[in-house]
Image (cartoon, rainbow, N blue to C red):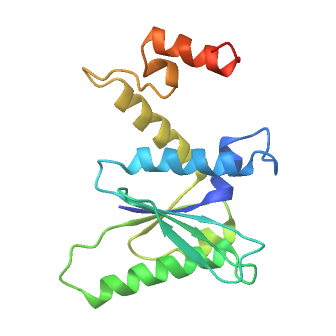
Amino acid sequence: MLYIIDGYNLMHALAPGGITAANLEEQRRVLVEQVINFVGGSGDSAAVVFDSARARGATAHEIPHTAVTVHYASAAESADILIGKLVRRELDARSAHPGKNPTHIRVVSADWEVQRGVMQEHVERLSPRNFITNLKKSEKGVANQPGMDRMRWKLEHKVDVETLRKLEDLRRGRG
């Protein structure tokens, strides 16, 4: 399965309180991490597409060691248009190799124009709310696996108490 995700559309669904310029970069990072976790180990892949008012041309960045690529549309070409092009490119690549087992494409967007533009065979439309439901089920499934410990992301979870105390002393100028 290939997920092509309208990034800001999904971000708005995940953050009903709104997105501000102050936390935009952080929310994009969190969204991409959630998508990486969602497709990780499943054999699926994802393309997350964001609009960009400053870029002169569309760019794509593969996230190393993942099946996720982040695309930024250009100022002249919206994310909606880029999503349509990605769907067309994937379908064209499949028609060039007819013996290959076709992978379905799921386009995650609430925009009617995007949804209408991708109504084709092997392309499924998925609303951001439905994707979020799948995302939460996936997170719960991973967290509830037997023998799965909670992930520890903070420094205090990775170092012993004495080292943590010394670091705190240095931070406060007591060292």
* Closer-to-camera residue (174/103): 174
Q: Residue at x 30, y 23 (%)?
A: 148
Please tell me how many numbered marks the rendered image carries: 0
Establish if 31 lies above or below 77: above
* Outermost residue, front side: 175
* Outermost residue, left side: 99
Specify the quadrant that holds the N terminus: bottom left
Establish if 109 lies above or below 136: below
146 left or right of 89?
Answer: left
3 left or right of 167?
Answer: left
**Residue 166 at what x, y percent from top left?**
54, 14
Q: Residue at x 34, y 20 (%)?
A: 149
Establish if 85 lies above or below 64: below
Specify the quadrant that holds the C terminus: top right
**Residue 65 at what x, y percent from top left?**
35, 56
Q: Residue at x 31, y 87 (%)?
A: 95
Q: Residue at x 34, y 23 (%)?
A: 144
**Residue 63 at what x, y percent from top left?**
45, 60
**Residue 125 at what x, y percent from top left?**
52, 62
